[in-house]
Image: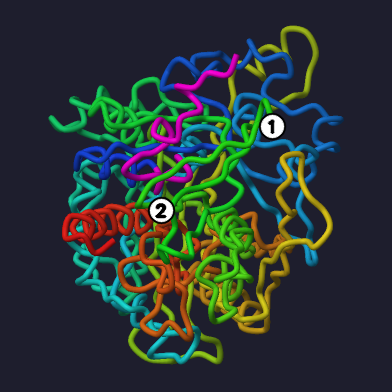
Amino acid sequence: MANFAIDSKDNRTYDAIVIGSGISGGWAAKELCEKGLKTLVLERGRNVEHIKDYPTTNMMPWEFEHRGQIPEEIQQANPVISRCYAYHEDTQHFFVKDTEHPYVQDKPFDWIRGYQVGGKSLLWARQVQRWSDYDFEGPARDGFAVDWPIRYADLAPWYSYVEKFAGISGNKDGLDNLPDGEFLPPMDLNCVEKYFKEKLETQYSGRNLIVARCAHLSEPQAIHLEQGRGQCMNRNLCQRGCPFGGYFSSNSSTLPWAMKTGNMTLRPNAVVQSIIYDEGKEKATGVQVIDAETKESIEFYAPLIFVNASALHTNTLLLNSKSNRFPEGLGNDNGLLGKYVAFHIYRGKISAAYDGELDNTTVGRRPTSGYIPRFRNVYKQETDFLRGYASGFGARRHIERDYDGIGQSLKDNLLNPKWGNWRVNSHMMGETIPKETNTVSLDPSQTDEWGMPLLKINIDYDDNDEKMIQDFFEQFTEMYERAGFTDIKTRDTGQAPGLDIHEMGGVRMGKDPKTSLLNKWNQLHACPNVFVTDGSSMTSTSTQNPSLTYMAFAARAVDYAVQEKNKLNL
């Protein structure tokens, strides 16, 4: 017998729907529920509950069957995900399998995904640098992409808002190209990092080395304890899921906070196929979902919809949301949906040796590193490429083990390692230019297990990127030499786009509906009761890590949307 209570349209109608439960979706859910809206959160992956579903979080290295390594046959079966720095035996359950979730690579693109409640907020590197006016003004000044519809001042209060709740460790550095925030006590640089900081900042104007800001509770405040979270223990096992809630994730923070309001309904295993558009009402009215396990098709309804499926999935969903009014995808009047996708460049790496500080060793573990904010083309155009790059920087003293000998001599060698010299390392985080030719689209014939068209990804580097990589090598080689570092080695990984895990754009914000999909409130120009606040909304990519900006956008957009809803404008 049919269950008429479940089948009832009333029982499938909410005040708001959030598609996706990762970094930005968690924030949208929290804000909507706190404001009293009955909110349905849809997640395509399985449920993952904080602490309960972190099966490896307290395991010792010897307790893993393969001592942490992924067996060769699994790597060969999953070539894309195996390239991710965080994919190991202790974390593989938080990554999708390549074969189960195919996509079409018109050009090589390593799409790193985690389908579960909390999404990639369980896997991120937790770096949270604010963007500055130089980033939001960049497209207008340099003439690439389109002008952002906002400036830093529009977002600054919302950065503060999310930082206080999430808990951000950092130092107030007073840099105009990297604005300060609401910080908990910072982590510390080690002795060689401090040495390079002193050399760098005395020899170059406008080049700084700071300790990178990270979403870790270095000194929990009342709001964090109320979330049930505790101090970061510097275990450096973050990607297994932190049982202390020492770092911010949707699972430990925003989702349980939303749940305890009594207003959130969480539905995992819900693959959203499309957003339903009612031509009579001229607005979106709900979503069509396929249950990932039963393959049942279900519709849910709400007058307010937030799309936070992650950048490329949001593009897929909107492109697949076709109607007579929007035959090319929801809100896609100008044909730009899926275009101007961009990412970050992580190809450039440089290392060197330092023979000083030999009476010191590395001090303990730390969930972040040094950070050199962007210094190229900040105040004026000074190179033959547009925009610039930031860089991570770290120093570590290596242990040299002697594996020679046999019997007691071998034991003695292994038990008495010697300290070697210090090594320093940097990696670039470059800004790519959003181009119309960097696109994602729907494959016309191939679908996945749930009937969704496969996403075709056509994204590549360009000459601007190649010049930027060479400049990184040249500038850091010079800085290393002037600091007295030796044995300098540069390396271009040659990796495909995507492995940076910072894909952005395709549903970009802008002032003009002719050249953008979203307005300054992350609201679809052509369908105002649909908001997009994940990475797909980004107009340009900056050099800073983007997650904090997604969080601020989500909180800001919800505040605006609820105000408009209460005024009956939505």
Which tag is nearer the camera, tag 1 or tag 2? 1
| Identity of the residue drawn at 54% across and 55% down | 425
Res 474 visible: no
- The local crowd at label 2, few if under 14, some if 14 to 19, many if 20 or more residues have their Cα within 10 Å, is many
User: Which sits in the foreground, 124 or 562?
Assistant: 562
Q: Is residue 17 left or right of residue 144?
A: left
User: Which sits in the foreground, 348 or 547?
Assistant: 547
Q: Is residue 234 left or right of residue 406?
A: left
Residue 248 position within the rendered picture, expressed as x and y whole percent measured from the top left: 35, 37
- The image quarter containing residue 255 is top left
| Identity of the residue drawn at 13% across and 30% down | 222
Residue 151 drawn above or below residue 401: below
Q: Is residue 92 left or right of residue 201?
A: right
The residue singled out by tag 1 in the image is 295
- The local crowd at label 1, few if under 14, some if 14 to 19, many if 20 or more residues have their Cα within 10 Å, is some
Image quarter hosting the N terminus: top right
Residue 17 is a magenta residue: yes
- The image quarter containing residue 266 is top left
Residue 184 position within the rendered picture, expressed as x and y whole percent measured from the top left: 20, 42
Using the image, tell me which numbered label, if any, was put on residue 547.
2
Residue 386 drawn above or below residue 426: below
Of callouts 1 and 2, the N-terminal one: 1
| Stretch of the chain drawn in magenta | 1-25
Callout 2 secondary element: helix
